[in-house]
Amino acid sequence: MIQPEFSKLWYVVYTRSRSEKKVHAGLTANHIESFLPLQKQLRQWNDRKRWVEVPLITGYCFVHIFKKDYLKVLQTQNVLSFVMFEQKPAVVPDREIESLKQMLRQTDFEVTVSFGSYQRGEKVEIIESPLMGLQGELIRANGKQRFLLRLNSINTVFFADVPAEFLTAIPTAVF
């Protein structure tokens, strides 16, 4: 097995308030692979409406680094610290990052974020739409059936309202 210090892993950093894009740009300028989940939203001003890209998770940016690059990341302007669990930087599995990227590539369904806890629901897979192949959970919220993608590593869930005909149940293994 490859030792963690010799392989790149995904970590999460806290950023200063409203500095997520600056952090992402700073990391990229320092040749550090980073991922900032953005979503387009229609914003209203007094005189106009405009589509803007806003961070999906405020205050967070993901970095794909070797252990030796911790200090380089922390020295990036507007980075406050790594997100920690049990006094260690939280590691986000590659499959969770890929699922999040796939969810954001589609434009058919609005994605929302929640840090609350939700009951585990039926395991489902999306069989149609740009999210085809993505697996997650089905829950009922506000009278709607919603597809839920759970990132356990940072205790965050993402929702998309996906029509039931686009979903299929994943059989549970019988032991």
Image: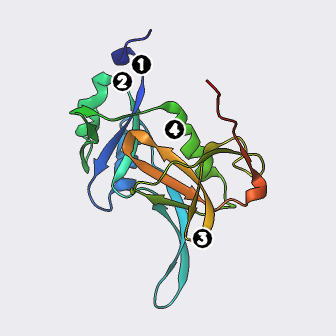
Q: Position of residue 131 (x, y in %)?
A: 69, 48
Residue 96: image tag: 4
The quarter holding residue 101 reads top right
Q: What secondary structure is found at the residue carrying circle 3? A: loop
Query: Which of 72/59 is in front?
Result: 59
Nearer to us of marks 4 and 1 is 4
Distance of mark 4 from mark 2, alpha carbons?
18 Å
The quarter holding residue 34 reads top left
Residue at x 66% of width, y 45% of height: 124
Q: What secondary structure is found at the residue carrying circle 4? A: helix
Nearer to us of marks 1 and 3 is 3
Task: Name the N-terminal-most of marks 2 and 3.
Answer: 2
Task: Name the N-terminal-most of marks 1 and 3.
Answer: 1
Q: Position of residue 2 (x, y in %)?
A: 43, 11
From the image, tell me which residue sits under label 1: 7
Q: Position of residue 26 (x, y in %)?
A: 35, 45
Nearer to us of marks 4 and 3 is 3
Residue 66: image tag: 2
Q: What secondary structure is found at the residue carrying circle 1? A: loop
Query: Which of 73/41 is in front?
Result: 41
Residue at x 42% of width, y 50% of height: 156
| Dot 2 and dot 1 residues touching (CB under 8 Å) | yes
